[in-house]
Amino acid sequence: MPETTKITGPLGIIAGQGPLPCVLAEAVAAHGIPLHIVGIRGEADAEIERFPHTWIKWGEIGRLFGGLEKSGCTDLVIIGAVNRPDFGNVRPDFGAIKALPFLLGLGKGGDDSVLSRIVSFFEDKGYRVHGAGDVAPELLVEEGTLSTKTPSAEDKTDIAMALKVVRALGQLDVGQGAIVAKGRVLAVEAAEGTDAMLQRCADLRTSGRTRGARAGVLVKAPKPGQEERIDMPTIGPETMKKVAEAGLAGVAVAAGRVLLAERAATIEAANKNKLFLVGEGWDDTDE
Amino acid sequence: MPETTKITGPLGIIAGQGPLPCVLAEAVAAHGIPLHIVGIRGEADAEIERFPHTWIKWGEIGRLFGGLEKSGCTDLVIIGAVNRPDFGNVRPDFGAIKALPFLLGLGKGGDDSVLSRIVSFFEDKGYRVHGAGDVAPELLVEEGTLSTKTPSAEDKTDIAMALKVVRALGQLDVGQGAIVAKGRVLAVEAAEGTDAMLQRCADLRTSGRTRGARAGVLVKAPKPGQEERIDMPTIGPETMKKVAEAGLAGVAVAAGRVLLAERAATIEAANKNKLFLVGEGWDDTDE
């Protein structure tokens, strides 16, 4: 597991959807590091108001940098999913107009190239961009079994195959997940996201195209070269619920490379649904 | 394009869903080859009754071989999708009981291993199993542009990338299709099938996660080592309609390796929807 990155000043957290921004803020605060959250309206949860914060709208890039400067943040974590903005509804401020060439480039290319450009955009302005796992390694899934249930021999074969699929796909900048059951690849994640992929497997089951006792595994791992500082694979209690509904037996993720949104609640959800949850050793040299 | 396989006697056609069994029967009849269709009830279209035929239910394996023997067929084509049978509803006849060890093995493994076992099952009984394209090569997509519209330079980049994804995945016995738009892999086909994959892209568009002018391509190609005699990638007029609804610009398939269910209607549907439809050279040595 990586060492905690030394943060010299207060940490800026640019917050998208879900509980992760606040989970991170709590962890950072527990490390004794001051912080300031910049929440994107319509994306970030109102919970961020528990911490020092600034709200911005999509396109208010001048206001974004204002919030960071005011609070003296030069270290940043960008965390939580965001919808690709509908540029028709964005009211750009002066900062956005200066950033226009950058913004216009965002519509094109694979996820990775878009995210790398976002990181470069901040780095070019003198900010240091960190991954959530770098500043709070306790949020990462560790190697080993986290659930009460452990994977069977058949589950282990499915895990190995799904890891292979994710590795092969990652080299083409595709997705972070795959589902394998009884040696058959049921689903591969691309732009639709993990939830939609799980829903698809639930549908296959409902329509009778898969059946029998619960079997199969959801595997999540980073893509080789993935911009993990801003787009780290993440699982949480909702993932466990959807995995159970899809008729799978459990979840395996790349240890140290996947965020656990709410650790206790996620493990509890795995146990409640009789799922295994394991962190698999993930060797970068194989990528 | 492959040579027409020499069929020495009448051809048995085991018919699943869709128009392909009848399209094949017509082509075979035009070659002057006698034929007998064995239709699976609940799967095959009533249209097969235009030809000499036998209806069987799932599990009536004795009756299946009876139909083939009665009509003197030792050459076979198995064609048209079938649902994996719900074994709870299958009433096996005596032939099925003898085939029980075979049937029990069908629930496991990737598509390819299941299909190879089906082919072996018939071959072990002395039948020769052919691909539809072997007995009627005119049903295959040829190399070149079939539609009025031709792919743009950007489309060609998307095609090349999608072909790469399909190749990488094929090596893991996954799917036959991928969708790439503006350099981004939108979807990868696994157990859900091409229609569901296209629907997903239409949904991404509706939800605003993809936008702008029509762009992107559906690519279909066989998996390396795919049992093409019984599971050849296929496109038809419905594919074109769904490709248009998904907001894509066109379709590219591996030339000589993908079946065109209804040639005239498919090209007409491509033109009506302003889509390109091309056959791409597909080099087996790269696989």
Image (cartoon, coloured by chain):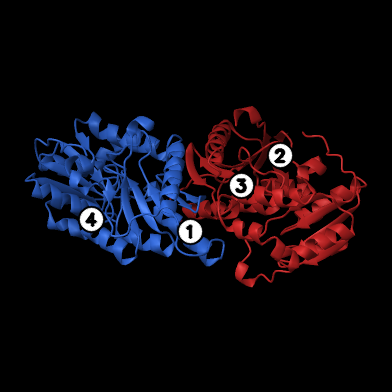
Chain colours: A red, B blue
Single out the mark in the foreground, 3 or 4: 3
Judging depth in this view, the residue of B219 and B19 nearest the camera is B219
Residue on which the image places disc 1: B201
Q: CA distance from mark 4 to mark 1?
A: 25 Å
Q: CA distance from mark 2 to mark 1?
A: 38 Å
Residue on which the image places disc 3: A112
Q: Residue at x 30, y 66 (%)?
A: B272
Amino acid type of disc 1?
Cys
Residue A40 appears in which quarter of the rendering?
bottom right
Residue A45 seen in the current view: no
Q: Write down the chain letter for disc 3.
A: A
Q: Where does the image place residue A250, in percent across and percent down from the top left?
A: 62, 42
Q: Are marks 3 and 4 in contact (CB under 8 Å)?
A: no
- On whether disc 2 and disc 3 are found on a single subunit, the reply is yes
Q: Write down the chain letter for disc 4.
A: B
* Element marked by disc 4: helix
Residue on which the image places disc 4: B263
Q: CA distance from mark 3 to mark 4?
A: 39 Å
* Location of the N terminus of chain A (image quadrant): top right
Q: Residue at x 83, y 64 (%)?
A: A54
Q: CA distance from mark 2 to mark 4?
A: 56 Å
Single out the mark in the foreground, 2 or 1: 1
Of the numbered discs in the image, which one, if any, rests on residue A148?
2
Single out the mark in the foreground, 2 or 4: 4
Amino acid type of disc 4?
Arg
* Location of the C terminus of chain A (image quadrant): top right
Judging depth in this view, the residue of B5 and B180 nearest the camera is B180
Q: CA distance from mark 2 to mark 3?
A: 35 Å
A115 vs A140: above or below:
below
Amino acid type of disc 3?
Asp
